[in-house]
Image (tube, grey):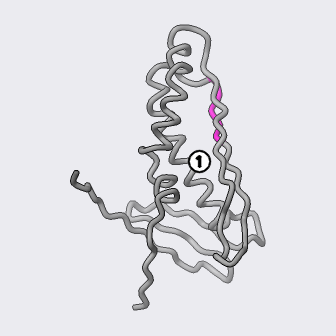
Amino acid sequence: MATDVSHRRLTVERVEAGTFAAVNDRGGRIVFGTAGGAEFTPVDLLMAAIGGCTAIDVDALTSRRAEPDSFEIGVDADKARDRGGNHLINIEVTYRIAFPAGAGGDKARAILPDVVRQSHDRLCTVSRTIELGAPVATRIE
Protein backbone atom coordinates (compact mmCIF):
# COMPACT_ATOMS: atom_id res chain seq x y z
CA MET A 1 0.00 0.00 0.00
CA ALA A 2 1.43 3.38 -1.01
CA THR A 3 1.98 6.10 1.55
CA ASP A 4 0.33 9.45 0.84
CA VAL A 5 2.57 12.23 2.20
CA SER A 6 1.91 15.97 2.40
CA HIS A 7 4.43 18.37 3.92
CA ARG A 8 3.59 20.65 6.87
CA ARG A 9 5.68 23.55 8.18
CA LEU A 10 5.54 26.15 10.91
CA THR A 11 8.05 28.38 12.63
CA VAL A 12 8.53 29.27 16.27
CA GLU A 13 9.64 32.83 16.93
CA ARG A 14 10.94 34.26 20.20
CA VAL A 15 8.71 37.16 21.30
CA GLU A 16 10.55 37.90 24.55
CA ALA A 17 12.21 35.94 27.33
CA GLY A 18 10.04 32.89 28.02
CA THR A 19 7.43 33.79 25.38
CA PHE A 20 7.26 32.40 21.86
CA ALA A 21 4.85 32.37 18.92
CA ALA A 22 4.12 29.50 16.57
CA VAL A 23 3.29 30.78 13.10
CA ASN A 24 1.89 28.55 10.38
CA ASP A 25 2.17 29.07 6.65
CA ARG A 26 -1.47 30.24 6.52
CA GLY A 27 -0.77 33.19 8.84
CA GLY A 28 -2.15 31.68 12.04
CA ARG A 29 -0.31 32.57 15.24
CA ILE A 30 -0.39 31.05 18.74
CA VAL A 31 1.59 32.63 21.58
CA PHE A 32 2.91 30.29 24.26
CA GLY A 33 5.55 30.25 26.91
CA THR A 34 6.95 28.83 30.08
CA ALA A 35 4.66 28.01 32.97
CA GLY A 36 5.18 31.47 34.50
CA GLY A 37 1.99 33.06 33.19
CA ALA A 38 -1.40 32.31 31.70
CA GLU A 39 0.04 31.37 28.30
CA PHE A 40 -0.18 27.80 27.19
CA THR A 41 3.00 25.78 27.64
CA PRO A 42 4.24 23.45 24.89
CA VAL A 43 2.81 20.52 26.91
CA ASP A 44 -0.58 22.29 27.07
CA LEU A 45 -0.42 22.72 23.30
CA LEU A 46 0.35 19.03 22.80
CA MET A 47 -2.62 18.09 24.96
CA ALA A 48 -4.80 20.62 23.11
CA ALA A 49 -3.64 19.11 19.81
CA ILE A 50 -4.71 15.65 20.97
CA GLY A 51 -8.13 16.90 22.07
CA GLY A 52 -8.55 19.23 19.12
CA CYS A 53 -7.67 16.62 16.53
CA THR A 54 -10.19 14.10 17.80
CA ALA A 55 -12.78 16.86 18.36
CA ILE A 56 -12.60 17.75 14.66
CA ASP A 57 -13.00 14.09 13.66
CA VAL A 58 -15.89 13.39 16.02
CA ASP A 59 -17.73 16.63 15.29
CA ALA A 60 -17.45 16.22 11.52
CA LEU A 61 -19.01 12.76 11.61
CA THR A 62 -21.64 13.15 14.34
CA SER A 63 -22.92 16.65 13.56
CA ARG A 64 -24.09 15.39 10.16
CA ARG A 65 -26.78 13.55 12.13
CA ALA A 66 -27.51 16.18 14.79
CA GLU A 67 -26.04 19.40 16.12
CA PRO A 68 -24.75 18.62 19.64
CA ASP A 69 -26.37 20.21 22.68
CA SER A 70 -22.95 20.22 24.34
CA PHE A 71 -19.50 19.20 23.17
CA GLU A 72 -16.44 19.00 25.40
CA ILE A 73 -13.36 16.84 25.26
CA GLY A 74 -11.08 16.56 28.27
CA VAL A 75 -7.45 15.55 28.00
CA ASP A 76 -5.60 14.45 31.12
CA ALA A 77 -2.01 13.28 31.45
CA ASP A 78 0.76 12.92 33.99
CA LYS A 79 4.16 14.48 33.30
CA ALA A 80 6.90 12.01 34.15
CA ARG A 81 10.62 12.49 34.54
CA ASP A 82 12.69 9.32 34.47
CA ARG A 83 15.69 7.76 32.72
CA GLY A 84 13.87 8.28 29.40
CA GLY A 85 13.70 12.04 30.06
CA ASN A 86 10.60 14.21 30.40
CA HIS A 87 7.44 12.81 28.81
CA LEU A 88 3.72 12.40 29.31
CA ILE A 89 2.20 9.17 30.58
CA ASN A 90 -1.34 8.04 31.33
CA ILE A 91 -2.83 10.19 28.56
CA GLU A 92 -6.62 9.91 28.68
CA VAL A 93 -9.19 11.56 26.43
CA THR A 94 -12.72 11.94 27.82
CA TYR A 95 -15.67 12.73 25.56
CA ARG A 96 -18.55 14.70 27.08
CA ILE A 97 -20.97 15.09 24.20
CA ALA A 98 -24.74 15.35 24.39
CA PHE A 99 -27.14 15.26 21.47
CA PRO A 100 -30.77 16.39 21.39
CA ALA A 101 -33.74 14.08 21.70
CA GLY A 102 -35.14 12.78 18.46
CA ALA A 103 -34.12 10.68 15.48
CA GLY A 104 -31.04 12.76 14.55
CA GLY A 105 -29.75 12.75 18.13
CA ASP A 106 -30.37 9.01 18.38
CA LYS A 107 -28.34 8.46 15.20
CA ALA A 108 -25.48 10.63 16.47
CA ARG A 109 -25.43 8.83 19.83
CA ALA A 110 -25.47 5.46 18.08
CA ILE A 111 -22.41 6.17 15.94
CA LEU A 112 -20.43 8.02 18.63
CA PRO A 113 -18.52 4.96 19.95
CA ASP A 114 -17.51 3.91 16.42
CA VAL A 115 -16.51 7.46 15.48
CA VAL A 116 -14.35 7.78 18.62
CA ARG A 117 -12.71 4.44 17.77
CA GLN A 118 -12.06 5.56 14.16
CA SER A 119 -10.52 8.81 15.38
CA HIS A 120 -8.27 6.94 17.79
CA ASP A 121 -7.33 4.08 15.48
CA ARG A 122 -6.72 5.90 12.19
CA LEU A 123 -8.03 9.46 11.71
CA CYS A 124 -6.39 11.67 14.35
CA THR A 125 -2.89 12.49 13.08
CA VAL A 126 -1.78 13.81 16.46
CA SER A 127 -2.63 10.84 18.67
CA ARG A 128 -1.65 8.39 15.90
CA THR A 129 1.80 10.03 15.71
CA ILE A 130 2.22 9.85 19.46
CA GLU A 131 1.17 6.22 19.66
CA LEU A 132 3.14 5.08 16.61
CA GLY A 133 6.16 7.22 17.46
CA ALA A 134 8.09 9.29 14.96
CA PRO A 135 11.74 10.27 15.03
CA VAL A 136 12.45 13.97 15.45
CA ALA A 137 15.52 15.12 13.56
CA THR A 138 17.40 18.29 14.46
CA ARG A 139 19.45 20.60 12.25
CA ILE A 140 21.33 23.82 12.99
CA GLU A 141 21.57 26.33 10.12
Residue 125 at x, y percent in the picture:
44, 52
Above or below 111: residue 7 = below
Residue 137 at x, y percent in the picture:
43, 79
Callout 1, which amino acid? Gly
Q: Residue furthest left?
A: 2
Q: Residue furthest top?
A: 102
Which residues are the magenta region?
Answer: 69-73
- Tell me the quarter of the picture where residue 30 sits: bottom right
Q: Which residue occupies 73% across, 59% down? A: 78
Of 42 and 136, which appears nearest the observer? 136
Instruction: Give yes or no for residue 89 being in the magenta stretch.
Output: no
Of 81 and 57, which appears nearest the observer? 81
Q: Secondary structure at mark 1?
A: helix
- On the image, numbered disc 1 is attached to which residue? 51
Overall secondary structure of the magenta stretch? strand
Above or below 137: residue 4 = above
Q: Which residue occupies 60% across, 53% down? A: 48
Above or below 9: residue 60 = above
Near mark 1 (Cα within 10 A), the count class, few <14, some 14-19 or many ≥20, is many
Report whether 37 appears left or right of 4: right
Report whether 1 appears left or right of 83: left
Residue 132 at x, y percent in the picture:
46, 58
The image quadrant where one finds the C terminus is bottom left
Report whether 37 appears left or right of 93: right
- Tell me the quarter of the picture where residue 45 sits: bottom right
Of 16 and 70, which appears nearest the observer? 70
Above or below 97: residue 80 = below
Q: Residue furthest bottom?
A: 141
